[in-house]
Structure formats: structure tokens, C-alpha cells
């Protein structure tokens, strides 16, 4: 699936015959047994984005990440050599969770010179080496060099920190991302440091929420404020301009009507006053755009949504971007993390513009989230198991196929070879 075809008019899915065009099953989103396989096959083998370099700005800066799908806690820290590393959040003495504040299951962050276990006082430096043991003579030939923190594979692409739990990852991070994603090299992510974060806990499988942002077929029904019928061409379908697949990753690009070109009655009053909202501030700083941002060469390009397998999406709107992460917590629940990132505001007005955009975008995202519980409950009845997908839902089809493929590959590797 590494080719970038330019499809014939009106067709996307048929250019990927391995995807098929028939109805699909969503049993991969309702089965507890499948989820357990998915945890091992996907979330313990793929590269996972856990943060950005701005979250560890100086030597000793750290944060922890609780990853339910892998049943682990991770420490990400910048060492004295300015390198960013990741470690399992486990003291090597008796297995106590090493870094936490008031509640051991909650994530935390800060700056320190070393990590000290609350239980028996063992200490580790920023590079993970064991540096101090209480009453070392009480142990039996303890070799400190053997008991440093257990590392997790960690790498950085364009400021995004990724980890991989596989003892021997099959690909480097850059190989895993592939040319479609690395085509974003040169986009100034490092300059977009004013962030507005939010988290939501959802009663649905993680893939069901990801599906909502892989197609815009639902927009006229679920988000009529986004593209009101009154401003669409008569009888015109609401379609995306470009879909693309590269390995396990996906891309959808759209053009569409700019918010400020709509009649005032179709905008929130706060949008009219602040000149900001669903598509971000109406004025954004000039930003150099790499060729990979608009691979479909859409003349009236508006948004490109890069969906990095398994659970990361980066939606780029030119001068700013929106990020989503979907973290499974069970077969039918997940934690949704999101943030908007802008150039640092230069005036109070720009700060207001950014805050309004963040709030309006959150509202639209939560409109999607509000559908999920009903979707999950209906799927779990098992009454229907063949769902037709249209050509605009090619990426929904692709995500579920890739997850199943990874699970089947994992299972095949664990079947003893026939003698």
C-alpha cells in the first residue's frame, strides 16, 4: 500500500484492490478477545507518539505517560547530554512505581536532578543509571551497573517524541513513518508552541472515534454549522478532494468554503466579533508549506489530516495545527487527547483569537464524540455485522484492515512451525 495513485474521477477505493469494496465488519471494535491481541500486536510493536520536545525543554525535564494498552507507565526525560530518553517507570529494587506525585496512576511532570524511589530510596540519574542504594552491604554482591532503569526505544521526528515497546523494532522511526509522513519535513512545528490541550474519556473503541475524522461524509448531517446547505452548491455532494495511503498511514485533504466567506447568520457571534473560530484565526502568520502538505495539489487547499498509525492524527491548517491521540483503555473505552498549536500570540487580540479557535474546535470534536456511545452500544448488540462503506470512507476501510492485518501477522508468528 505504498503507492500514491492519482485516481480516476469519482473513484478512490478501487485503486486499492486489496481493500475490497464489499461490506465490512466492526467486530475488531467490539471483541474483548481481539482487543487483547491488538494490545500485543499493535500497541506493543508500533511507534507511539507520547509528546513533543517542548515538554522536556531543559536538562532534567521529564514527564510520565500511562499507556493502558501496553499496561505500562513510562518516564520521558532529557539527560545531561541533551538527549531525550524513555524508561519504564519501575524501580529495579522491588518494582515500585518510581515517579509519581499524590496518586500513582496519574501522569505527572517536572524537573529534577535524579529520580528517587519513595519506597526504599534507590536513586537513578537522568540517563537511567543506578547511582545510590541504601545499605548496599546488606545485599549479596549487588552490581549497580546491572540495575539501571529499563529503557524503552525512543526517537524524535520533527519534535514529536515516539517510543516503541518492541525489544527489537522492525523499523526505525523514520522508516516506519514513510515518505508520505516525512513529506512534512520542513513544516515549522517547532514555532507553534502556544498550546490549548483537552482530554476526554469516551465509551467507545478507539478506532470508532478515529473513523469520525477519516471521512467528511458525515459533516452535512452532524455538523450543519460547518458547511450549511444554504452555502453549498445545489445538490452537490460534500466530498474531500484527496485521499492517500502509504503503508499503515492515511491522509485526507479538503478544500471547502472558508468560514469568513459565509453569510454572518451561519457563524457564531463570537466568530464574527473575534474573526476566529472553526478554521482558526482568520489571519495567520505566513508559514512556509512543504510540498508534502498538499500532495493532491488542491487549488483551494484548506486542511490536510495526516493519520499516523496507530493512534495519532495531525491536522494542519497552514499556519497552525491540531493534534489528536486515541489511547485504548479497554475494548470499548479510550482516552482522547487533543490540542491546538499556534504561533505565540503577539497581542492580546491574537491570544483571544487562539482561545476562541480552540474552544470552537473542541465543540465540533465533541459533537463527534457525542455519537460514539450510541455507535458502540449498537455495534455490541451484534445484530448487524456487514456495513457498506462508500468511496469517501476509504480510510475507514483501510484502518480496520491494517489493524486486523497486524493482529493476524502477530498470531502467525506465534504458531509453531509444522514439522
Image (cartoon, grey):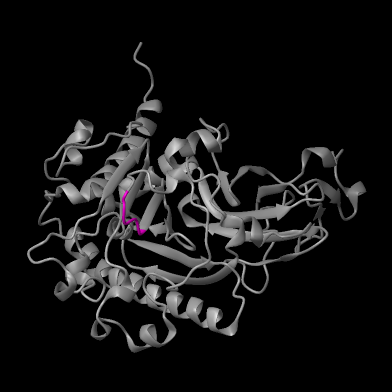
Quadrant of image for the C terminus: top left
- Please provide the residue range marked out in magenta: 298-302
Q: Is residue 196 above or below residue 84?
A: below
91 to 261, vertically: above or below: above
Q: Residue at x 10, y 57 (%)?
A: 383
Residue lying furthest left: 235
Q: Which image quadrant for residue 221? A: bottom left
Location of the N terminus by quadrant is top left
Q: Position of residue 64 (x, y in %)?
A: 63, 60
Expressed as whole percent of the image width and height from the top left, the position of residue 183 reads: 47, 41
Q: Is residue 202 rendered to the left or right of residue 83?
A: left
**Pick the front one: 302 or 218:** 302
| Residue located 87% across and 38% down the image | 141
Residue at 51% over, 33% down: 175
Is residue 368 shown above or below 38? below
Asked if the magenta segment contains residue 301, the reply would be yes
| Front residue of this view, candidates 284 and 376 | 284
Amino acid at each position: 500500500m505504498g503507492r500514491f495513485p492519482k485516481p480516476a474521477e469519482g473513484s478512490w477505493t478501487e485503486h486499492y484492490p486489496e481493500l475490497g469494496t464489499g461490506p465490512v465488519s466492526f467486530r475488531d471494535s467490539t471483541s474483548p478477545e481481539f482487543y487483547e491481541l491488538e494490545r500485543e500486536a499493535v500497541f506493543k510493536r508500533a511507534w507511539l507518539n507520547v509528546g513533543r520536545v517542548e515538554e522536556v525543554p531543559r536538562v532534567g525535564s521529564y514527564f510520565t505517560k500511562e499507556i493502558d494498552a501496553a499496561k505500562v507507565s513510562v518516564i520521558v526525560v532529557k539527560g545531561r547530554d541533551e538527549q531525550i530518553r524513555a524508561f519504564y517507570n519501575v524501580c529495579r529494587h522491588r518494582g515500585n512505581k518510581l515517579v509519581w506525585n499524590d496518586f500513582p496512576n496519574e501522569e505527572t511532570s517536572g524537573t529534577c536532578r535524579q529520580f528517587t524511589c519513595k519506597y526504599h530510596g534507590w536513586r537513578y540519574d537522568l540517563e537511567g543509571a543506578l547511582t545510590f542504594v541504601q545499605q548496599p552491604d546488606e545485599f549479596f554482591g549487588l552490581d549497580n551497573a546491572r540495575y539501571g532503569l529499563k529503557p524503552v526505544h525512543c526517537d524524535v521526528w520533527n519534535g514529536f517524541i515516539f517510543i516503541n515497546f518492541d525489544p527489537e523494532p522492525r523499523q526505525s522511526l523514520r522508516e516506519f513513518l514513510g515518505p508520505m509522513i516525512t513529506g512534512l519535513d520542513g513544516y515549522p512545528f517547532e514555532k507553534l508552541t502556544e498550546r490549548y490541550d483537552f482530554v476526554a474519556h469516551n465509551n467507545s473503541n478507539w478506532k470508532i472515534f478515529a473513523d469520525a475524522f477519516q471521512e467528511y461524509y458525515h459533516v452535512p448531517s452532524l455538523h450543519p454549522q460547518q458547511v450549511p446547505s444554504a452555502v453549498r452548491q445545489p445538490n452537490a455532494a460534500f466530498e474531500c478532494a484527496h485521499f492517500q495511503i502509504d503503508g499503515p498511514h492515511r491522509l485526507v485533504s479538503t478544500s471547502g468554503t472558508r468560514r469568513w466567506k459565509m453569510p454572518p447568520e451561519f457563524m457564531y457571534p463570537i466568530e464574527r466579533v473575534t474573526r476566529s473560530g472553526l478554521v482558526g484565526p482568520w489571519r495567520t502568520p505566513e508559514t512556509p508549506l512543504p510540498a508534502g502538505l498538499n500532495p493532491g495539489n488542491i487549488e483551494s487547499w484548506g486542511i490536510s489530516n495526516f493519520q499516523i498509525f496507530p493512534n495519532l492524527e495531525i491536522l494542519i491548517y497552514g499556519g497552525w495545527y491540531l493534534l489528536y491521540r486515541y489511547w485504548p483503555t479497554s475494548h470499548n473505552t479510550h482516552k482522547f487527547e487533543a490540542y491546538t498549536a499556534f504561533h505565540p500570540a503577539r497581542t492580546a487580540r491574537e491570544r483571544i483569537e487562539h482561545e476562541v479557535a480552540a474552544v470552537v474546535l473542541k465543540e465540533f470534536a465533541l459533537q463527534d464524540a457525542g455519537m460514539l456511545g450510541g455507535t458502540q452500544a449498537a455495534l455490541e448488540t451484534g445484530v448487524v455485522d456487514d456495513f457498506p462503506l462508500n468511496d469517501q470512507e476509504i480510510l475507514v476501510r483501510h484502518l480496520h484492515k491494517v489493524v486486523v492485518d497486524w493482529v493476524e501477522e502477530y498470531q502467525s508468528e506465534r504458531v509453531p512451525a509444522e514439522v
